[in-house]
Structure formats: structure tokens, C-alpha cells
Image: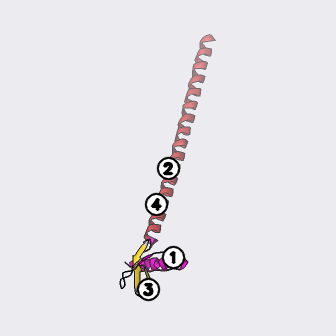
Amino acid sequence: MKVFEKKCPNCGGNLDFKFGERDVTCGSCRRKYAVEYGVDDLSQLSEKAMEALKSADITLRPVRRMIVLIVAIFIGISVLATIISIISMNNSRAEFERKKQETQLEFEQQSQKMLDQVW
């Protein structure tokens, strides 16, 4: 895949090379050159990259939707766990209050029996 096209200073032929290559050989005169990158080369690379993304029709919408779905599921599970925890605490508290009343009633009955025996 050609990324950059420049002209050979010797013969005017095309120097085609990929970004990152350090040396390029002219296809016409076979002269070798060291590749130096400038700001224009980087902007050309980013334009080519954008063209490649557009031609490949790459979009992040499905990824974003998946992330939103995962976050929504996580929040839903968190809310459900909180509700279950609150219900469990309320049930435990109700059970504690019931046992407390039973114990208090039993204590009063035992106390009354002891008082009745004494009198």
C-alpha cells in the first residue's frame, strides 16, 4: 500500500514508500535516498488514514452501544442488590424486634411466676 508519493530529484520518477521506511529507491533510475519526514508528510498520512477509515466504514457506534448496555446492566444489578439488601435488613430487624418482644414477654411471665411463688 502506497502512503507517500514524491518525485525523484535525479530523474523526476515517482518515489513511492510507506510511512516509517527510512530508505527509498527510485523505480526509474534506481538511485537510493534517505527518507525524511516533515509536517506535510504527517498531515498526508492522517488524511490517508481518515480515507482508509471511511472506506472501511469503521464506526464506533456498536462499541458505544455495547458500553452503554454494559453500564446500564451494571447499574441495574447494583440497584437490585441494594433493594435486596434493604429488604433483608428490614426482615432481620423485624425478626430481631419479634424475638425481643418474645423474650421480654417470657421474662415478664417468669418474673410473675417467681413473684407468685414468693407471695
Find the magenta span and give its range.
Answer: 32-61
Q: Secondary structure at mark 2?
A: helix
Residues tagged 1 and 4 counted as in contact (Cβ below 8 A): no
Label 1 vs label 4: CA separation? 37 Å
Q: CA distance from mark 4 to mark 2?
A: 16 Å
Q: Nearer the viewer, mark 2 or mark 1?
A: 1
- For the residues labelled 3 and 1, the Cα–Cα distance comes to 24 Å
Image location of residue 82, percent across then percent down: 53, 49
**Residue pushed farthest top?**
118
* Mark closer to the observer (3, 1): 3
The image quarter in which residue 5 lies:
bottom left
**Magenta highlight: main SS:** helix
CA separation in Å, label 3 and label 2: 74 Å
Q: Nearer the viewer, mark 1 or mark 4?
A: 1
Label 4 element class: helix
In the rendered view, would you say 35 is above or below 72?
below
**x 55%, y 77%: residue:** 39
Quarter of the image with the N terminus is: bottom left
Determine which residue is flagged by label 4: 70
Q: Closer to the camera, 61 or 58? A: 58
Q: Which residue is mark 2?
A: 81
**Circle 3/circle 1 CB separation < 8 Å:** no
Callout 4 crowding tier (Cα within 10 Å): few <14, some 14–19, many ≥20: few
Q: In which quadrant will I find the C terminus?
A: top right
Closest to the camera, between mark 3 and mark 2, is: 3
* Helix, strand or loop at mark 3: loop
At x 62%, y 15%, the residue is: 115
**75 and 7: which is toward the camera:** 7
Q: Quadrant of residue 54?
A: bottom left
Residue 42, disc: 1
| Residue wearing tag 3 | 10
Q: Secondary structure at mark 1?
A: helix
